[in-house]
Amino acid sequence: MMLKTKKDKKIFVTSPLLPDIEDVYSEIREIFDSKWLTNMGEKHKSLELALKNELKVKNLSLFNNGTIALVTAIKALNLPYGSEVITTPFTFAATPHSIVWNGLKPVFCDIEPNTMTIDPNKIEELITPNTSAILGVHVYGFPCDVEAIQKIADKHGLKVIYDAAHCFSTEINGRGIGTFGNISAFSFHATKLFNTIEGGALTYNDDSLDRKIYNLRNFGIRNEEVVEEVGINGKMNEFQAAFGLLNLKIYRKEQEKRQKLKELYDNKLSKIKGIRIPKIPDNVTNSYQYYPIIIEDDYPISRNEIYDRFKEENIFTRKYFYPACTDYDCYKNDLSVKLAKLPVTNNLKNKVLCLPYYGSLEKETAEYIIYKLQNGMN
Ligand SMILES: Cc1ncc(COP(=O)(O)O)c(C=O)c1O
């Protein structure tokens, strides 16, 4: 089997969701007419309201990107300076970095083998008198075990933060994923299912966090004469918000296309010896953000070899998440990282591979990817 697009076109793991360009022009015209480019304008207000409904959350604050949102979430909880936050090493750099940017210490906990999220059974042994919070990541849209984590947090008086960058629109038993824990942080980066080019949001149930988060996002400025605290500039601008309003109208269609692609991949790949497809629980709605597969030891070649062979054909899969955060130069020399017991992470980081996954991926390309995997990449 030959791929027509081979060599002449690069296939990436994702492709950004783009609204109709004429609609973008018309949004930009409105922004130009209003002469209000940023600082919580009309587009910003509309998107905040629309997303609150879409994500079924009580409170939502927009941000200029997901990382600043996450940094602000941690800051808003007033955790004691230097305290420890238990988190996962199987995530994007922004997760532990956000802890460190707050003057706190990430303590890395191993993950659960199917969902690849922080393993609640391994959290309690890491709790010390210095622990202040748990930061879980709903990685690839697989929700953390939110119930078990909340139980542990309540027992030990800890705050719970979720990095929800991968799970736009995910619900557990009909409840919005952004309503669990104290605060959840979403990313609306161009690579995410729903994007505002760059962007993000915090969601939270506690109304009293609203003022704090507003302040932290806007230099701490309350009004012309009052600066209440040491805030940062985390504001989403009107262009980002307008882009989001347009993408909000089309992301469900994109999900439907990805669902079909998932069915195609699932049907064929689940029959291949040595390939495991992690399963999303029945009570969870899929965000369709990523399509990760696990290359087990009984597949003829390794994950890295599969990655290299696809790359030779201009198909760019992703070893997402390799390296683990605990392998980064900025973390690996810390004594607690050296001593951390992370067998599942250290196994899966060498086995997971995210396949190209977006609505406009041609069926022929998906079938070629399947064909190569069925044939041991020969
Ligand atoms: C798990 C995770 N957390 C945080 C982020 C950071 O979001 P942003 O790129 O919007 O800053 C990303 C991705 O970009 C992510 O994948």
Image (cartoon, rainbow, N blue to C red):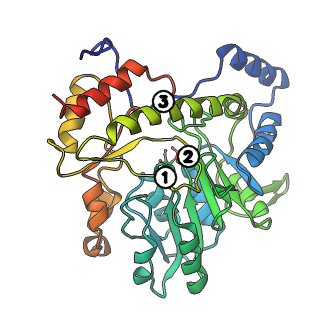
Q: Nearer the viewer, residue 222 or 345?
A: 345
Per the image, the residue denoted by label 3 is: 358
Query: Judging from the image, what secondary structure is the residue with disc 2 in?
Result: loop
Per the image, the residue denoted by label 2 is: 286
Tell me the amino acid under the disc marked 3: Tyr
Query: Judging from the image, what secondary structure is the residue with disc 1 in?
Result: loop
Closer mark to the observer between disc 3 and disc 1: 1
Asked which quadrant contains residue 221, the reply is bottom right
| Quadrant where the image shows the C terminus | top left
Tell me the amino acid under the disc marked 1: Ile
Mark 2 surroundings within 10 Å by alpha-carbon count, few (fewer than 14), some (14 through 19), many (20 or more): many
- Compute the Cα span from label 2 to label 1: 7 Å
Closer mark to the observer between disc 2 and disc 3: 2
- Compute the Cα span from label 2 to label 3: 14 Å
Residue at 64 percent across and 34 percent down: it is 252
Q: Is residue 179 left or right of residue 68?
A: right
Q: Is residue 366 left or right of residue 209?
A: left
Q: Is residue 25 left or right of residue 41?
A: left
Label 2 CB less than 8 angstroms from ligand 1: no
- Compute the Cα span from label 3 to label 1: 18 Å
Task: Tell me which numbered mark, 3 or 1, is placed earlier along the sequence.
Answer: 1
Tell me the amino acid under the disc marked 2: Asn
Per the image, the residue denoted by label 1 is: 280
Residue at 29 percent across and 54 percent down: it is 349
Q: Position of residue 157 (x, y in %)?
A: 60, 83
Task: Tell me which numbered mark, 2 or 1, is placed earlier along the sequence.
Answer: 1
Q: Does the residue at mark 2 contact the one at mark 1 (Cβ under 8 Å)?
A: yes
Residue at 48 percent across and 28 percent down: it is 15
